[in-house]
Amino acid sequence: MRGAVFANDERIYFAAEALKKLGMEIDCANDYSRGQNLLVKNPQNYDFVLLPVRGTEDGTILQSAGTSLFIGDFLKGLSEGTPVFTGRQTEYLGQLNLTLYDPFKDPEVSKKNAGLTAEGVLWFLLEYTKKSLFENSYDVVGAGHTGKAITEILRKLRLPVRQAARNGHLDTISMEQWERETPSDVVIVTVPALVLPVELAESWEKPVFVLDISSGQVGADPKIAELKNITYYAAPPLPSKVAPESAGVLIADYIGRIMSDKNIRKANAAPAKNEG
């Protein structure tokens, strides 16, 4: 089995290495020269393609050295039905009628990646609040896999933390209650929808450190950064910062499962050979 990998961060590079350990033949474009070498090859020779986590908006991907690589023609040349793995299924990719797979929508990958994100949140808070973790209180907005993982790791450290969700239950409060009450020192937004508009942040009368780790960083209005009492950050992909190898292995294992399943179904659908 042969795969083409376009890597522009360490996660994808480590995913390529993990795929090789699974016995796959991998051509990895992790710099400009390797990218050019890969692009001159016949796309139809590949059984799958792994793109950067953020996909591509226009057929161009930025590489780690700051160079750009146009892969649109390569993608258009793939055989029909070739699996293309990416964490962001952009409008551009949809228009190419590719067979797209998002590893992060897989329940197993999502749950394990949430744990890596939670570790990344701790690193980010230590790096950017310039204070001990134990000097702040925390609000985690959202109760999906990521929100739960962050809340769990903060509680294991015995830090004061509240979790807000659409419907409050057990150890969470409702969004309505959270909006009415005074925020904690640190607000971590995990919901991929606007839950922290400027109007709400303007009502806060204390300094608040806001970290938006929602998909696409859409949970908090970036204009809140203009408010004097708000310190606002839209987080980078945290697993790639603190545990790129672990994150890459998650992606590789998912690809291995998908490709194994496709091969089994292909074999079952094939006509039986005449052995006699």
Image: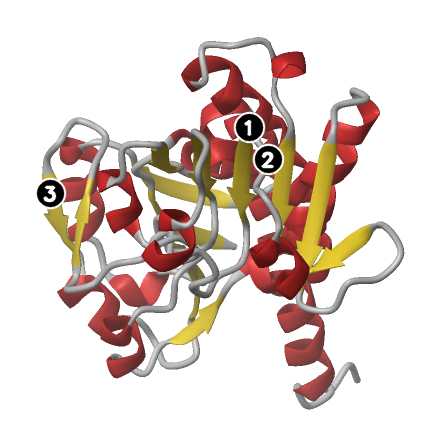
The image quadrant that residue 174 belongs to is: bottom right
Q: Nearer the viewer, residue 162 or 93?
A: 162
User: Which tag, 1 or 3, sits closer to the chain's start?
Assistant: 3
**Can you give x and y, in whole percent of width and height, for residue 270 in the image?**
66, 86
The residue that disc 3 covers is 68
Q: Is residue 21 visible?
A: no
User: Which tag, 1 or 2, sits closer to the chain's start?
Assistant: 1
Mark 1 falls on what kind of element? helix
CA gap between label 1 and label 3 equals 28 Å
State whether residue 24 is above or below residue 73. Answer: above
**Can you give x and y, in whole percent of width and height, for residue 80 in the image?**
37, 81
The image quadrant that residue 77 belongs to is: bottom left
The residue that disc 1 covers is 120
CA gap between label 3 and label 2 equals 42 Å
Q: Nearer the viewer, mark 1 or mark 2?
A: 2
The residue depicted at 33 percent of the width and 40 percent of the height is 7
* Left or right placement of residue 55 versus residue 174 in this view: left
The residue that disc 2 covers is 184
